[in-house]
Image: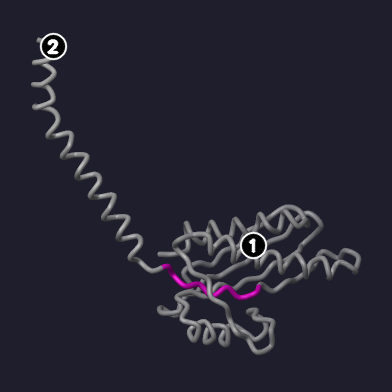
Amino acid sequence: MVQASFHVKSRLCAPGWWRAIALAGATVLASTALAEAIEPLTVAVANFDFRDTSGEADGQIDGHDERLTAFGATLRDSLSRRKKFSITSLACRNGQCTARDPGIAELYEEAKRAGANYLLIGEIHKMSTLVGWAKYVLLDINANKPTCDRFITYRGDTDEAWKRAARFVANDIERNCIP
């Protein structure tokens, strides 16, 4: 009797259950195939400018240059680890590759030549020993307009504080800046 009721239950329940599993599996496979078929968005990441209005003693320029370089590397690395993005380099003539030098117009044209969908530009501003901010703009190359214009503050003038800020910028771009 137990065996018969089990057999009946499996006959009545299994087809619906298997159908749901098959449909769910097909949906997962289709969405996975679609995600793999969609090419990542190409982002050209310009170097960020740096401004220090903290009034602190001189002699910190080398440390800030290193932190700015590390900020850019962390930002590029954080974005490139996401399947949604592909990072491309800008071949600026002067080596600066910032919004200030050679300028936004030249960076925009260079990003177009590099085949980028977006151009990321920005500036780090050290206001004091404890407070810094990052201003960044993500420009849509095809629509010729910004999709994101953000201003964040962070605490601390340490290597780790700057890296955390760079990772936050990458997260924000992925979550909030791409339509």
Dot 2 alpha-carbon crowd within 10 angstroms: few under 14, some 14 to 19, many 20 or more: few
Q: Secondary structure at mark 2?
A: helix
Q: Is residue 82 above or below residue 90?
A: above
Numbered badge on residue 153: none
Could you tell me residue 14's position as x and y percent? 14, 30
Which amino acid does the dot numbered 1 rest on? Thr
Numbered badge on residue 74: 1
Name the front one of labels 1 and 2. 2
Could you tell me residue 65's position as x and y percent? 78, 70
Numbered badge on residue 2: 2
Residue 71 falls in which quadrant of the image?
bottom right
Task: Please give the name of the residue rendered at 65% of the width and 86% of the height, measured from the top-left corner.
Answer: 102
Quadrant of the snapshot with the N terminus: top left
Q: Is residue 150 left or right of residue 160?
A: left
Task: Please give the name of the residue rendered at 41% of the width and 79% of the height, measured from the top-left corner.
Answer: 142
Q: Is residue 70 above or below residue 116?
A: above
Residue placed furthest toward the front: 3
Could you tell me residue 97's position as x and y percent? 65, 81
Q: Main secondary structure of the magenta part?
A: strand
Could you tell me residue 33's position as x and y percent? 30, 59
Q: Is residue 11 left or right of residue 95?
A: left
Task: Please give the name of the residue rendered at 62% of the width and 84% of the height, measured from the top-left corner.
Answer: 103
Task: Please give the name of the residue rendered at 46% of the width and 69% of the height, measured from the top-left corner.
Answer: 147
Quadrant of the snapshot with the C terminus: bottom left
Q: Is residue 96 above or below residue 74?
A: below
The stretch of residues the image draws in magenta is 40-47
From the viewer's side, name the closer residue of 128 and 110: 110
Which amino acid does the dot numbered 2 rest on? Val
Residue 128 on the magenta span: no
